Amino acid sequence: MQTKGRVTDFVSEIYRHKTRERIWVSETAWCVKRPGGAPDVFEGTVLDASARMQAEAKIAHMAHHDALTDLPNRSRLTQRIEQALRDIESCPFALHYLDLDRFKEVNDTLGHAAGDTLLRRAARRLRRAVRSSDVVARLGGDEFAVIQFGAASDREVGECAARIVRSLSAPYRIGPHRANVSASVGIALAPGDGADVQALSKNADIALYQAKADGRKIYRRFDAGIEARLQEKRKIEGELRGALAKGEFVIAYQPIIACASGVTEGFEALLRWQHPERGLVAPSVFVPIAEEIGIMEPIGEWILREACGQVARLPGAPFAAVNLSPFQFRGRGMVKTVMSAIASSGLPASRLLLEITETVLLHDDKLTREALSQLRQVGVMIALDDFGTGHSSLHYLRKFRFDKIKIDRSFIDGFEKDKANGAVVRAVIGLGRDLETAVIAEGVETQEQFDLLATLGCQSAQGFLLGEPQPIDHWRGAVDANRRNPAVDVAKLGRERRAGRGRA
């Protein structure tokens, strides 16, 4: 007032005289001078600014906190990491990055409201799993972070991560539903794993990626080897994007044999990547990457068309078994694609077997059910693949009508001696018989397994005993001989031909 003659919106915190209530006031005042220029009086206004200050505090809070969980957000986390790095000599810390495994399934099956409820409960569990002095933040979606202060040893860091995994992996009860998700955690220690926010966050994220790749529901500490593997993965991603256009994909076919007669019933089309430098790349390496980067739909369509065309030209009438990826159903053009492949190849619909896993049925939406129904109406066969490895196979057998059930190879392995596997195999064969659904056993590798499956009434089998995956031309002569004489041992012909021409 003395210097400038006025003050505008001077905000201060005061106590009410009578009640001692703490409030905020805003004062605006000016000096009224006498004719000679000397100050006469000060006049102005005093307003209650408490509501305004509360609104501004709320806006400031919202700018740095997540609206759903009220946890600090990414911006606030960055500020706290920067602050912690300035005090690193007196207080070492670890940065934990984590997300919820299979959260998307909960969101898709139970709805977004249930997903939000799960996230809020996971946030509360996360707060309880760490110390009150640690910082818990939500980065977005199902991703969270924890700054663990005073992390002086790997043991302390590991114990904290293990508590987080245990706490967040316990089942969640959401209304009448039980949601089963788990947590994966990646850890970076400052300053060894990063001396700035960007490096530390990147390395914690890389460690999280490794935890998910190693099976999930675990934690992993960052190391340079993980980063090298991630760079290799990114290199494969780039090469994979152009593989289809360059004609680098090929199909190998594995015969499916009738257990009772030995007749070749069909062939399963198996994708292979013939890389010009890497050689033959295993599907287990590149298929998950192709699904992750969103190119599985065009690859799946190519497999379907190639398999229909190549099997249609074989002698006799074997069927073509083609695996469908869940990503192919997301395009909602699956039925048209299948019908086009059948029409262009000349393969009758009754000679096409589409193999789907429970993942395709998981969403249980109307469009998926209608697509499967339309395909069956035109004569296409539908098989439930990898039976027994999912979490609700019996539910799907009740809800959908399958032409065939495929027993996963993990149950066939040693089932003739392993009591548990043997019980599962017998149960599935009996289930198929009662449902009037053919059963195919995968991964048959010994004559003893094949003979026992035939005795138990299993309709069909495939595996290395009966023929390894080979190019279609490899099987042409064997199929022709088998068609003319069903007693011919197809597996033996396959082994003889492989011995004469070398393994593909």
Image (tube, rainbow, N blue to C red):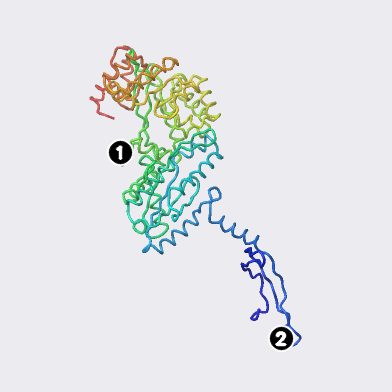
Q: Residues within 10 Å of mark 1 (few under 14, many from 20)?
A: few
Amino acid bearing label 1: Gly
Mark 1 or 2, nearer chain start: 2
From the top left corner, tell me how far across and down residue 133 is, in percent: 44, 56
Give the left or right position of residue 255, taking residue 376 as reference: left
| Residue linked to disc 2 | 38
Corner quadrant of residue 34: bottom right
The residue under the point 52% across, 45% down is: 120
Mark-to-mark CA distance, 1 and 2: 95 Å
Circle 2: element type: loop
Give the left or right position of residue 257, taking residue 128 as reference: left
Residue 250 position (above or below residue 118): above
Circle 1: element type: strand
The residue under the point 41% across, 22% down is: 405
| Residue linked to disc 1 | 279
Corner quadrant of residue 99: top left
Q: Quadrant of the N terminus?
A: bottom right
From the top left corner, tell me how far across and down residue 358 is, in percent: 45, 29
Corner quadrant of residue 462: top left
Amino acid bearing label 2: Ala
From the top left corner, tell me how far across and down residue 127 is, in percent: 46, 49
Residue 412 position (above or below residue 235): above
Q: Quadrant of the C terminus?
A: top left
Residue 30 vs residue 250, the one in the foreground: 30
